Image (spheres, helix red, strand yellow):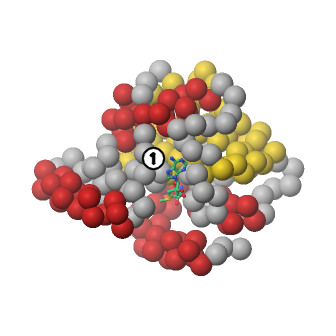
Amino acid sequence: MKNFSDMAYDLFMLPLETFLLNRRRKSIFRDVAGNVLEIGAGTGTNLKYYQYDKLKSLTITDQDLSPALLNHKYPEDLNIKTIEADAENLPFETASMDSVVFTLVFCSVTDPYAGLNEIRRVLKPGGRIFFIEHVLPLNNPMRRVFHKANHQWKKMAGGCNLSRETDKIIEESGFKIEKLERFFGAFITGVASIS
Ligand SMILES: C[S@@+](CC[C@H](N)C(=O)[O-])C[C@H]1O[C@@H](n2cnc3c(N)ncnc32)[C@H](O)[C@@H]1O
């Protein structure tokens, strides 16, 4: 059961989910398999997209676990853990995960390089990340608008950073981008592996 703030967030996101995000979520989850870690799972929007029969285990994390994640009816025969954890300090063994998923999270991770280093550490060799993020637009008028709005937006939206270039940060953190789609000017979705 979702609480009021989860429902308010989901309602706020509904137009974006309907017109932009939901088919991209479906698309990344086609290849998510094995021992899976989700970072910053929020209100549990991704839970309906997992192909549970492809998973060996699912570890759901957020820095602040919502009741929706704790109370969700997960498949009974799957090893599921819900754990409060910061992306920058993951309480998991090195080389223990096959897939790591994060969607709309790295805009607000305080130290994205530390978060991605931790993800690299917990991934097995050949492991992959699957992501959707909003990023700084490429074209100039929009970049300026995003930079200008960033200070106020961060205060209103719990630290969400409009100026972040998470695609660059992923590459600078030693991942090899396998697939990348930029959409609606300010969003990216893709898959990357440990290079
Ligand atoms: C905008 S919500 C996105 C939720 C969900 N992934 C989705 O796609 O709708 C961002 C989530 O990231 C979590 N988060 C932010 N910084 C984090 C960090 N450093 N470590 C773990 N989770 C974090 C927040 O608590 C929040 O639940």
- For badge 1, the amino acid type reads Val
Q: Find residue 53 and report its horizontal and vertical position in percent.
A: 76, 47
Q: Find residue 175 and report its horizontal and vertical position in percent.
A: 45, 27
How many marks on residues? 1
Q: Find residue 125 and report its horizontal and vertical position in percent.
A: 61, 21
Residue 5, image quadrant: bottom right
Residue found 34% across the figure and 53% down from its top: 161
Most foreground residue, 38 or 128: 38
Q: Is residue 106 visible?
A: no
Asked if ligand 1 lies within 8 A of label 1, the reply is: yes
Q: Residue furthest front?
A: 155
Whether residue 187 is situated above or below residue 34 in the rendered picture = below
Residue found 78% across the figure and 58% down from its top: 74
Q: Residue furthest left?
A: 141
Residue 154, image quadrant: bottom left
Relative to 49, 148 lies left or right:
left
Whether residue 70 is situated above or below residue 107 in the rendered picture = below
Please state, as top left, top right, bottom left or bottom right, where the N terminus lies in the image. bottom right
Q: Find residue 150 and report its horizontal and vertical position in percent.
A: 26, 58
Residue found 47% across the figure and 21% down from its top: 195
Mark 1 surroundings: few (<14), some (14-19) or many (≥20) residues within 10 A: many
Which element carries disc 1, helix, strand or loop?
loop
Residue found 70% across the figure and 45% down from its top: 59
Most foreground residue, 43 or 188: 43
Residue 48, image quadrant: bottom right
Per the image, the residue denoted by label 1 is 109
Q: Is residue 76 visible?
A: yes
Relative to 160, 78 lies left or right:
right
